[in-house]
Amino acid sequence: FSSNTQTDYHMVKKQHSRQQPMENLREEISALLKEGLFSSAWTLASFLVSHKSKKRASAQDRANDWTLFGDAAFGLTSYAQARGFYQKGLGFIRGASSKESKMESAMIEYQIKLRIADCHIKLREHDAALVILKAIPFKHRPLRHSLKLARLLEQRGRRKLAIHAYQEILDRTKGTRMVIEAAQALARLQTPTTGRKTHAASSAGHTAAAAAAAFVDRLPFIEKLTTAHGLTAKYKLGMASKAFEVLLEEFPGNLYLMVRQATLQFDMGKLDEALELFRGARELYPLSCEGADTHALILRIRERTSELSRLTQDLIRKAPDRPEPWIVCSLDYSTEAKLNSKKAMECLNRVLCLYPGHTGALLAKGFLHLRHNDGKRAALAYNRVKGISTGITGIEEEPISMPVLPRFCVFQGLVEAFLQMHEVKRALSVAKEALELMPHNPKSLTLIGIVLSQSPEMKEKACKAFKRALSIDKKCLDAVEALSRFYHLEKRYDKIIELLKEQLKHRRRDYLHIRLGDAYKMSGDLELALEQYHAALVLTPDHREALKGIETLEMAAKDESMMDDVEEDVDDELEG
């Protein structure tokens, strides 16, 4: 070698030795990220982006270094910091000069932009995420990001674009991947809130059916599942429930189906059937939190305080980082046994601070406000949940709340809230909306009757509405309770007794025995009342209403005995 050649060789070797540690460092950070060791990766990445040789590195290398730093921050849930690191990397990649490097840089740029969009979604900066995702061509967008885009479009009320986005996903994966979320969304979107099916909605229904049909040979149950979701979206709850029941026969013990079916039963007012399904799901999957908020709400309504407390302790111990245990805890704090309203609301606010659109937390909040006769705050909670759903299968990967038609319990809550506020017209408007969506649903007719019963001149129409609801479904508990309250106001206790005795022929339930005991007590038959309260305790030994009823009767009997003794003493004195 000549002296010049030797000098060049040594310079290249020296430069390579300086660059090699940085390359090793990149490999080490990548390996740590794959292992989920984000704190270690973050520390090493801070050295990577600050090394003195960084100025001599290529634009792509510098962009890659900042992207690794951003990935480490994202893994540590420092989403704002991660977004800043990604944006620095994006700035470097845009500085590529040659045509070849620009084509390669475009691919890297898309990857960084997708990461920035993820940060925006985590930070609930949905408009910014939407702008980025729309700008990335479909072929360069992974399926999960295409699904996020479709959800964001649907959330923003851009129905046609959302349908198109979901269709793109199914068209791209036809015959290869069954993206259940996209098929369910299209089944849901085929039922517009206006009541008239649009061309886009009709197309959505056909696409969902076509996507399901493509999997009939390999996954025949997919078509049934899509149909069941479509029926739910159309408020054909009875038919949807039967569809899920058929699927459960084929897949007994399926957690997803059990929770779906239980939630449908709850919305149909069949709380006992829903409770049995939730209990079965917890027995099979004791570590699962799916549907626990609805499960707890039923226990709270039914006054199963001991079971609710056990569920609370179990969930808090097993899954303290999930929102459902804290919703369950809030309902437990609200029981008469604990009656700690402040702690109950603190638990719910904790959930809503992290997940502002969490349906279960908002429903629980509305329920608790109603129990405290705070109709105004209850209406605010139910109005927030109206048209919002995060899915009953727990938290979605991203905090994107999806607009859907409201569940029936939202209509019920709003009607009760408006009646507490003495806003009968607004209550009637909500009840009519429910009836329009579900004209043959006995619960809808009951809701109309409840509002009509507030007006003296409409009482007969209200009674007819309750009886019509029972003619459709003689086991409709909402109609039974509403008609019982109606007869109670009219002081027609014999009618209440007749109605409840008929119900007890079909099913023995603690709450029916308690209501019958109350009716006997009001009619003056204390012995039969006591008998009914004891019958309720046989079914639920710690039922507070039954215990309170017995206590009231015992006090009444004691007072009557004391009065008899006083009368006897007075008679003795007069005779003396």
Image (spheres, grey):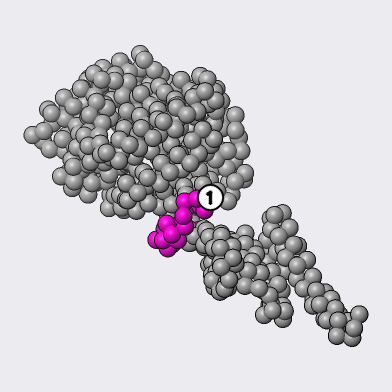
Residue 135 colored magenta? Answer: yes
Give residue 99's quadrant in the image: bottom right
Q: Residue at x 55, y 48 (%)?
A: 322
Q: Is residue 431 visible?
A: no
Query: Above or below — where is 131 with respect to 550?
Result: below
Q: Is residue 410 visible?
A: yes
Query: Above or below — where is 487 with respect to 396?
Result: above
Nearest to the observer: residue 491 or residue 186: 186
Q: Residue at x 50, y 50 (%)?
A: 139
Q: Quadrant of the N terminus?
A: bottom right
Seen as rendered, the residue at the extreme front is 2
Seen as rendered, the residue at the extreme top is 505
Query: Above or below — where is 455 with respect to 83?
Result: above
Residue highlighted by disc 1? 142
**Majority secondary structure of the magenta segment?**
helix
Q: Is residue 250 left or right of residue 189?
A: right
Nearest to the observer: residue 110 or residue 521: 110
Seen as rendered, the residue at the extreme right is 1
Query: Above or below — where is 352 with respect to 244?
Result: below
Q: Residue 172, percent across and down?
A: 48, 41
Nearest to the observer: residue 300 or residue 64: 64
* Kind of residue sitting beneath label 1: Pro
Q: Residue 555, percent across and down?
A: 37, 32
Q: Residue 93, percent across and down?
A: 57, 70
Q: Which residues are magenta?
A: 122-142
Give residue 91's quadrant in the image: bottom right
Seen as rendered, the residue at the extreme bottom is 3
Neighbour tally class for label 1: few under 14, some 14-19, many 20 plus, Cα within 10 Å: few
